[in-house]
Image (cartoon, grey):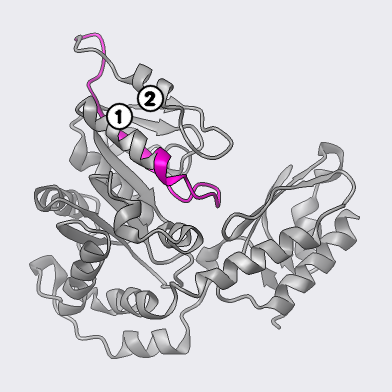
């Protein structure tokens, strides 16, 4: 067990020895010219896995989402997003700053969904006073929750009936796949484009993949270049993502089990509400008068997490059962 238990995010993982070996052995070319064989192999594999025509390797989930947004929408055209979505809260306002794409924001329900009636009401009529509503964006998983398959299907169908395109921020899509048992292509069937991140639960150091129709990916490639994402010998990064697909998908079930163990171990603390673990995240709501300096107190005891009144604890492949037990002990000491 290491000296520090880091529950801040599943982005803190380090490449495993096997992944480092794959990186070192990667055959590379110039990806801007389209001749890096390892990048090409990753793109073909992810496109097939998600049932889409084509794919594009990008540096991050944010870059993948922005490539999608700017490929679906012209300047002044509108996307419908969740108020607590990553695209709305955690991408620096890039949609507006870089793409000129305004957001119509709808409050997420507790399960991460956006009410279908509110989505439909948000779609603007053809009137020069309004932006043209062009895109619906959803996120799965959302705060560790898997969106119901029937909801994803219904939301996508609603959007398509009204002529909208659909994009899924699937940064932790494989957590949803493992937790639900639904095949990746079926899970994203209703979405025109999907972004998938490899540097979170899958443990790669860098990279996401955006999938969609071939003409859409051609536009996204141009946007990626504008955003500074045209990499050269990127096969060293794609090799890590390919290794993750081979070795780190099924093991996400361990992270989910550790999150359940963590949530169970924290039940009964006074003034603390523990949200059940759905995948690899546990949320603790702490009474305001007890929250001051809490993250710093935990850090001094070797437990790293994020939050203020609501703590977020994220399990990942660098943590074992002993780390989870230690985290429970520290949290019970500080909060109990």
Of the numbered discs 1 and 2, the one sitting upstream in the chain is 2
Image height of 37 relative to 228, above or below:
below
Quadrant where the image shows the N terminus = bottom right
* Quadrant assignment, res 181: bottom left
Q: Are marks 1 and 2 in contact (CB under 8 Å)?
A: yes
Q: Can the viewer see residue 101 in this picture?
A: no
Q: Can the viewer see residue 23 in this picture?
A: yes
Q: Which mark is residue 119?
A: 2
Q: Which residues are magenta?
A: 128-151
Residue 149 pos. (x, y %): 41, 46
Q: Which mark is residue 158?
A: 1
* Quadrant assignment, res 164: top left
Q: How many marks?
A: 2
| Residue drawn at x 46%, y 31% as measured from the top left | 114
Question: Which SS class for mark 1?
Answer: helix
Image height of 102 relative to 179, above or below:
above
Image height of 62 relative to 321, above or below:
above
Residue 226 pos. (x, y %): 19, 50
* Quadrant assignment, res 305: bottom right
């Amino acid at each position: 067990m290491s000296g520090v238990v880091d529950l801040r995010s599943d982005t803190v993982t380090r490449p495993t020895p096997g992944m480092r070996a794959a990186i070192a052995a990667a055959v590379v070319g110039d990806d801007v010219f389209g001749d890096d064989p390892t990048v090409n192999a990753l793109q073909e594999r992810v496109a097939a896995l998600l049932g889409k025509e084509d794919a594009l390797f990008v540096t991050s989930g944010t870059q993948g989402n922005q490539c999608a947004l700017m490929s679906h929408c012209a300047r002044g055209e509108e996307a419908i997003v969740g108020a607590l979505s990553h695209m709305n809260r955690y991408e620096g306002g890039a949609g507006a700053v870089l793409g000129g794409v305004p957001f119509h924001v709808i409050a997420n329900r507790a399960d991460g969904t956006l009410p279908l009636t509110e989505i439909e009401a948000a779609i603007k009529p053809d009137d020069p006073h309004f932006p043209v509503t062009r895109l619906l964006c959803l996120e799965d998983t959302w705060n560790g929750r898997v969106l119901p398959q029937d909801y994803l299907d219904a939301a996508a169908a609603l959007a398509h009936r009204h002529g909208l395109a659909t994009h899924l921020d699937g940064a932790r899509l494989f957590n949803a796949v493992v937790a639900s048992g639904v095949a990746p292509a079926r899970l994203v069937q209703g979405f025109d484009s999907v972004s998938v991140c490899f540097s979170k639960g899958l443990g790669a150091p860098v990279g996401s993949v955006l999938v969609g129709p071939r003409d859409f990916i051609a536009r996204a490639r141009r946007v990626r270049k504008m955003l500074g994402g045209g990499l050269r010998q990127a096969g060293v990064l794609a090799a890590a993502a390919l290794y993750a697909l081979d070795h780190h998908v099924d093991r996400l079930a361990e992270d989910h089990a550790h999150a359940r163990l963590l949530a169970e171990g924290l039940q009964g603390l006074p003034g603390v509400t523990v949200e059940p673990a759905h995948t690899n995240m546990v949320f603790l709501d702490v009474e305001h008068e007890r929250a001051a300096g809490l993250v710093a107190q935990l850090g001094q005891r070797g437990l790293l997490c994020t939050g203020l009144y609501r703590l977020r604890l994220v399990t990942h492949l660098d943590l074992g059962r002993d780390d989870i037990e230690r985290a429970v002990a520290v949290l019970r000491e500080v909060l109990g």
